[in-house]
Image (tube, rainbow, N blue to C red):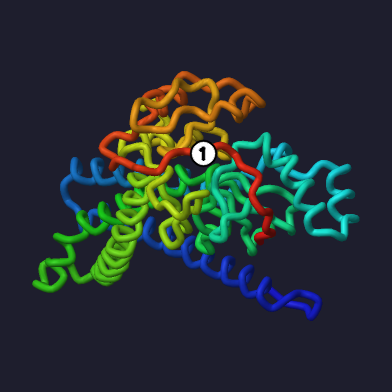
Amino acid sequence: MKCTRSFRPTVCTIIASAEFKSQIINKFVKTKLYLSLSLSSAETIENIGEKIVYLLVYHVLFIMFVWTYWQTIFTKPMNPLKEFHLPHSDKELFEHEDRRESQQEVLRRIAKDLPIYTRTMSGAIRYCDRCLLLKPDRCHHCSACDMCILKMDHHCPWVNNCVGFANYKFFMLFLAYSLLYCLFVTATDLQYFIQFWTNGLPDTQAKFHIMFLFFAASTFSVSLAFLFAYHCWLVCKNRSTLEAFRAPAFQHGPDKNAFSLGTRKNFLQVFGDEKKYWLLPIFSSLGDGCSFPTCLVNADPEQPSSPSGRNPSIESAGESHQFPPKPLRESQSRLISNGQSEGSEDRDTQGTSNPALTIEKET
């Protein structure tokens, strides 16, 4: 890829790096496919039943690996709904106002009817001056994609895409099937790897393929195991990678466990409540990506009041608007029906309404 002077070096570096890494992965997959099939040759595996089992399990894992990888790459990240964007009239008014207080008043009028509870570290409403919108909870602006991404986890150069609300389930399944894929290749290759060092293999080219395959698969297995375990922990805690490094801030201050509803409900929020879709790269996550139930506030007016010890639903927000516009599914209602996370710690901090705080631009 040639980089002209009109392109910024950082953009070219990102694109070239993504293309290079994609080529490496593609070559690695093709190599592993060829080498794994070579293990099924008559010179390596003599038992016909063992050959069939190896091929069946291998191709199932390989197909799921490619399917989840495809979904992770080509699923377009979701952006905030139009309700969070500045209307044309308000945009013109905002741009032509010289006084900061007048600009803030324009943003307050829009923010008061939106389910926004997270703040900047200084306590201001989060506003993106590049996308000209009020950021929904857990939404962040990606500098690589140059857009705001709903529930952004991170921008992954290995898939050349943003991992967020739209494809986080696919990303988790991609890690899971990649790990299983590498572990299967390592396990099935282990006995022949041992025979390689004990001179128990026929003197053919396959013996060198076996050695390379074992080292490559085992190395990837270790790295994928740590990455997959870390993201499993994030799912159980209902945090994104960004939130793990910097806790989301609310009116009362930062709270790293604000979105945690308990391990089971946190899992259902990502994978959905329909078990038949849990292991398939088919979108089944709960919610719309713009609003999330928390253990601090209950932004949905359709939900019952929280039990004693928790702040009740926000009456002012509930009476003024119905958000999201579509009614919640029964599965989403069950997700926060009790209003209290399973096994979560008691909190002294009470939920608050959507106050008109000082507006601060944030990119």
Q: Quadrant of the C terminus?
A: bottom right
Q: Observer-nearest residue: 338 or 4?
A: 338
Relative to the observer, which residue lies in front, 284 or 321?
321
**Residue, disc 1:** 352
Residue type at numbered disc 1: Thr
**Which residue is pictured at 57% across the width and 52% down the height?**
119
Q: Residue at x 55, y 24 (%)?
A: 301
Q: Identify which residue is drawn at 46% across, 19% down.
A: 330
Which percent across, then down, holds residue 341?
33, 35
Numbered-mark total: 1
Looking at this view, is 95 or 283 the one in front?
95
Task: Count neighbours of disc 1 (C-alpha within 10 A) and say few if under 14, some if 14 to 19, many if 20 or more.
Answer: some
Q: Mark 1: which secondary structure?
A: loop
Q: Position of residue 23 (x, y in %)?
A: 53, 65
Could you tell me if residue 276 is visible in this image?
Answer: no
Front residue of this view, candidates 273 and 252: 252
Q: Residue at x 26, y 55 (%)?
A: 183
In this picture, residue 218 sits left or right of residue 126: left
Measuring from the top left, give residue 42's x and y in whole percent: 23, 54
Residue 68 shows in this picture: yes
Q: Quadrant of the N terminus?
A: bottom right
